[in-house]
Amino acid sequence: MHDESNPFYSYQPIGTIHSAFTDVAGMPIQPNGARGVQGTIDLVPDFCEGLSDLDGFSRIFLLYALHRSSGYSLTVTPFLDPIPRGVFATRSPKRPNAIGLSIVRLTGIDKCKLSIEDVDVVDGTPLLDIKPYVPEFDAYPGERCGWLSAVAHKAKHTRSDDRFR
């Protein structure tokens, strides 16, 4: 039962995301800059049954702990723009709740191990949840994207640095 008097929540990772990126600096900043980059997910055995029927999806959402980020800033200077922005108008890891989100390609499932591509996540990242990507639910072409509309095309070639450690 949810206790509304306690505003804090804790989450137990359901697995670990593995990638070729051992350091945050130099990584792609979004999955579209990581096209073809392969990785794996090792799911905790207790959760393997939850993978049933996931093999019918080509893309999945990964929600994960930004475990290498500490603290938060309500105003940040994003990678794609020199102008400081409100953190909720960015995808900065320096968030009040350090939770990341990526859409990756699911290329295989072998028992409790998932093979994925388009990975923009540092190796060893704790995985909090997996959700299927469904274009009819999740794609809204032509919607406004604020200040990012002028610079989003740069994400494909922009790499991170260590500014958000």
Image (cartoon, helix red, strand yellow):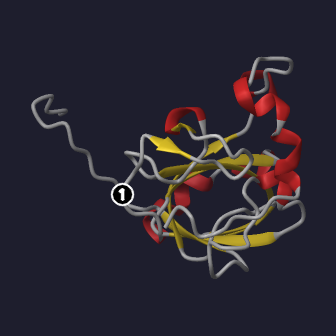
Q: Is residue 53 visible?
A: no
Q: Residue 140: give x, y in percent of width and height.
A: 79, 20
Label 1: which secondary element: loop
Seen from the viewer's position, the closer of residues 118 and 98 is: 98
Query: Up-down: is 107 above or below 26?
Result: above
Q: Residue 93: give x, y in percent of width and height.
A: 53, 54
- At horizontal 75% and vertical 63% (from top left) the residue drawn is 119
- At horizontal 58% and vertical 41% (from top left) the residue drawn is 84
- At horizontal 87% and vertical 53% (from top left) the residue drawn is 156
Seen from the viewer's position, the closer of residues 97 and 160 is: 160
- Tell me the amino acid under the disc marked 1: Gly
Q: Residue furthest top?
A: 143
Badge 1 crowding class, 10 Å Cα cut-off, few under 14, some 14 to 19, many 20 or more, is few
Query: Up-down: is 130 above or below 39?
Result: above
Q: Residue 109: give x, y in percent of width and height.
A: 73, 65
Left or right of 163 on screen, residue 40: right
